[in-house]
Image (cartoon, rainbow, N blue to C red):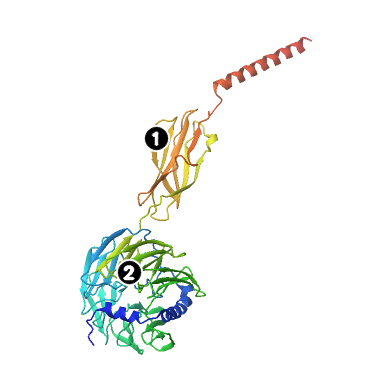
Amino acid sequence: MNHAFNGRIVFSANMRKLGFASSLLATVLLLLVLSAMLPRIQASGNDDWPMFHHDLQHSGYSTSTAPNTNYKLWNYTTGGWVSSSPAAVHGEIYVGSNDNEIYCLNASTGALIWNFTTGGPVSSSPAVADDRVYVGSFDGNVYCLDASNGALTWNYATGGFIVCSPAVAYGNVYAGSGDKNVYCLNASTGAFVWNFTTGAGVFSSPAIFNGNVYIGSDDNRIYCLNASTGALIWKVSTGGLVESSPAVSYGYVYFGSYDRNVYCLNASTGALIWNFTTGAEVFSSPAVAYGNVYVGSFDRNIYCLNASTGALVWNYTTNDEINGSPAIAYGNVYIASGDYKIYCFAFVDITPPNITGVSQAPPKNNVSSQDIVEVNATVTDDASGVKEVTLSYASNNGAWTNVTMSNLLENVWSASIPAFPYGTNVTYIIIAQDNAGNAITTLGTAYEHQYVVIPEFPTPTIALPLFMIFTLLAVGFRRRKQLRHQN
């Protein structure tokens, strides 16, 4: 078999064999496996996307923020068509290309860090674990590379081309091959552990859960294998090839179809929630984050859809078909296109912070000339975070003085206004800025505050009449006493 042919042709040809009913049945069967895992799937705890579809369960879900516009931060041009899905770990992006290369790029800038040349096109999506990169190639090899510099640690030759994405668990690497086998290799050395032979090429990416390996084959079956021994636990026949990978999030399952639609189904019942029609077949596996679904289409677009309604949030048109699946990390979406490019779309925070709970001590009707006024405010920003909060105050409509507020507890900020003489009219506002440069002020809102300084002791206008009253009373009392004494 010639392993050097274009993975774009093979992958597209295989997928076009699927009828919608067969594709839906395969997806639902995969969902049954995945939904059984749902209660135990845990968030990664960081912004990394270390393998195809994020995790060993292939949930396709990230806790990262994600782009709310189609702002392109950067793109990197490889030497060939790209259908590999990126992995993102420790601020670096790992992705393969049909120019036979595996690339490592800076996640923030797209700058090349290193590249490694294999013997064939690389449609496989890398998996990164323990500072090593595991990836397959059309040359039939599973490669293990040093994540820091791309140096070869080991490679293992199978009997067929590899387009699936390896999974790393239990100290082993699991991958399918065009030679009909599922392989288990030692992750450290590449030594053969076991293989399981199916009835056709294995191009589905394995999912790992609870000591088992779940993987589809072009023999129209889904297999469950013991991860330690490779022993068959069960297999289920479908009506077509099993290559698709749905995303399961928010109680829904999201997947694309060759009928040009992106579908959202209820994960418990399979009921249709919504579908969105693109301009061509959708082979890309969706990724879900920040309330949105991100997916590519053969109509050359990457789409961002509202996860609840399917409404279009944004789209971006590349110069060729998109077969690969997006990765979401560090607030960005990374996806490759047939135009040889890897794209990075950035999250753009356009929402200012939120200011609530402004309070002062002493309260505004009880501030004397001796009092320093402490002002507290609750300031939040769920997108890029609060950068700075300022208290600005003015006395008797004079010049404004700015004081940087201190962060006392999580979202509570505090600063003080100095004491002012009796009768001073003091106005103050809060100004908050987030890390994206958005700012907000309480000027002109319900949180514009004023107070007037009251006297510490009675004023002369009050004291003099009181003195006169008490004097008259004292004189009157004395005279009355003298009269009683004379009588």
Residue, x 56% and y 20% (percent of image)? 461
- The residue beneath circle 1 is 400
Q: Is residue 167 visible?
A: yes
What crowding class fits label 1: few (fewer than 14 Cα within 10 Å), some (14-19), or many (20 or more)?
some
- Is 157 placed above or below 257 here? below
- The residue beneath circle 2 is 299
The image quadrant that residue 246 belongs to is bottom left
Q: Which of 70 and 105 is in front in this view?
A: 70
Coordinates of residue 196 in the picture (x, y in percent): 35, 88
Q: Nearer the viewer, residue 431 or 418?
A: 431
Q: Nearer the viewer, residue 15 or 456?
A: 15
Q: Is residue 330 visible?
A: no
| Image quadrant occupied by the N terminus | bottom left
Taking the image as shown, residue 193 lies to the left or right of residue 418, namely left
| Image quadrant occupied by the C terminus | top right
Which amino acid is tagged 1?
Trp
Which amino acid is tagged 2?
Asp
Q: Nearer the viewer, residue 281 or 306?
A: 281
Coordinates of residue 268 in the picture (x, y in percent): 51, 74
Classify mark 2: helix, strand or loop. loop
Coordinates of residue 295 in the picture (x, y in percent): 37, 68
Residue furthest right as drawn: 487
